[in-house]
């Protein structure tokens, strides 16, 4: 029989992660691991643990292996086929929660992935009516699981390309964290991202701005009057995306900075 102590001995270099994985498998919190190091483990747990640690060595993101990622205080189901939610995106979501409060706004999330932006808005702003669109089958499946997990009402998640499935609806807010990595930069990303996360969620075309151009132009047909268009952008794209909004007649443009001082959110209004 293998004890906790014995099992963890081989993983000294990645102990924090090993403890996180083990506590998840044992369904206990981390402090339990520290205080029960002589406890013997079932064969099943040892097997699952070694399997996950092996996959980690091959570069699989830990969030896929654990099947979840914390975002805005909620534990989102994630998996292969959707981008792992980045905590960077919380800047945008916190801004919108504060902007929307309890208002009855119609919100459209373009390219929802696991659903982090739209579903955390629906969770914290009970007055909204949320529509989401994503072209990926995996995204629609996983985001719907999250919708059920958080028991969210007034949420519609549609499969399709950008505005294609929308019809005649108009929205007070259109939000998107589109793929924005320039094609040539993808090969320079760390293996965990470029070899395991979906390219389709990263690739923003030659200069990374393809989706900002397309969404900004088309959004004008789907915004209610004085509607807001709001984006997450790459750390060096703030100025360029602001220019795209200006060229399309948007006004009152704001760039919000992250904690490092990079402009990571760009928003504007269409009158
Ligand atoms: N922020 C992501 C990354 O660092 C990219 C997300 C996106 O393209 N929307 O890989």
Image: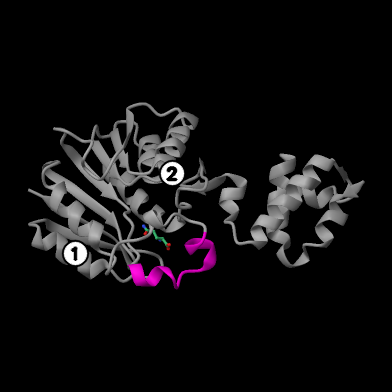
Residue 265 horizontal side relative to residue 223, left or right: right
Crowd rating for badge 2 (residues with CA inside 10 Å; few <14, some 14–19, many 20+)? many
Q: Is residue 178 magenta?
A: no
- The residue shown at (36%, 50%) is 94
Residue 31 horizontal side relative to residue 104, left or right: right
- The residue shown at (80%, 47%) is 46
Q: Can you identify the residue that label 1 sits on? A: 242
- The vertical placement of 191 against 169, above or below, is below
Report, in whole angstroms, how far the alpha carbon at label 1 lies from the one at label 2.
27 Å
Quarter-of-image position of residue 140: top left
Q: Position of residue 194 (x, y in %)?
A: 47, 63
Q: Extreme right residue here?
A: 1
Quarter-of-image position of residue 58: bottom right
From the image, give the main secondary structure of the stretch colored magenta: helix
Q: Position of residue 213 (x, y in %)?
A: 18, 59
- The residue shown at (48%, 52%) is 84
SS for tag 1? helix
Q: Position of residue 172 (x, y in %)?
A: 18, 40
- What's the magenta region? 183-195
Which numbered circle lies on residue 114?
Answer: 2
């Amino acid at each position: 029989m293998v004890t906790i102590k014995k099992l963890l001995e081989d993983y000294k270099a990645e102990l924090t992660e090993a403890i996180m994985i083990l506590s998840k498998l044992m369904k206990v919190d981390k402090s339990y691991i520290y205080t029960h190091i002589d406890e013997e483990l079932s064969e099943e747990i040892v097997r699952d643990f070694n399997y996950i640690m092996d996959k980690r060595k091959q570069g699989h993101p830990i969030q896929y292996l654990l099947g979840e990622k914390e975002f805005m205080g909620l534990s989102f189901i994630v998996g292969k086929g959707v981008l792992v939610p980045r905590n960077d995106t919380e800047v945008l979501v916190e801004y919108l929660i504060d902007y929307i409060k309890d208002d009855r706004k119609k919100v459209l999330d373009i390219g929802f992935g696991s659903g982090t932006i739209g579903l955390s808005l629906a969770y914290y702003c009970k007055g909204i009516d949320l529509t989401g669109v994503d072209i990926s089958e995996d995204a629609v499946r996983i985001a719907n699981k999250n919708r059920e997990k958080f028991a969210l009402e007034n949420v519609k998640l549609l499969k399709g390309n950008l505005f294609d499935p929308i019809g005649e609806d108009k929205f007070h807010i259109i939000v998107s964290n589109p793929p924005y990595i320039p094609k040539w930069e993808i090969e320079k990303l760390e293996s965990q991202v470029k070899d395991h996360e979906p390219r389709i969620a990263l690739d923003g075309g030659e200069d990374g701005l393809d989706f900002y151009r397309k969404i900004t132009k088309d959004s004008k047909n789907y915004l209610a009057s004085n509607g807001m268009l709001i984006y997450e952008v790459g750390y060096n794209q703030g100025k360029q995306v602001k220019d795209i909004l200006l060229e399309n007649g948007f006004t009152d443009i704001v760039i919000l900075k992250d904690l490092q001082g990079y402009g990571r959110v760009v928003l504007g209004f269409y009158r």
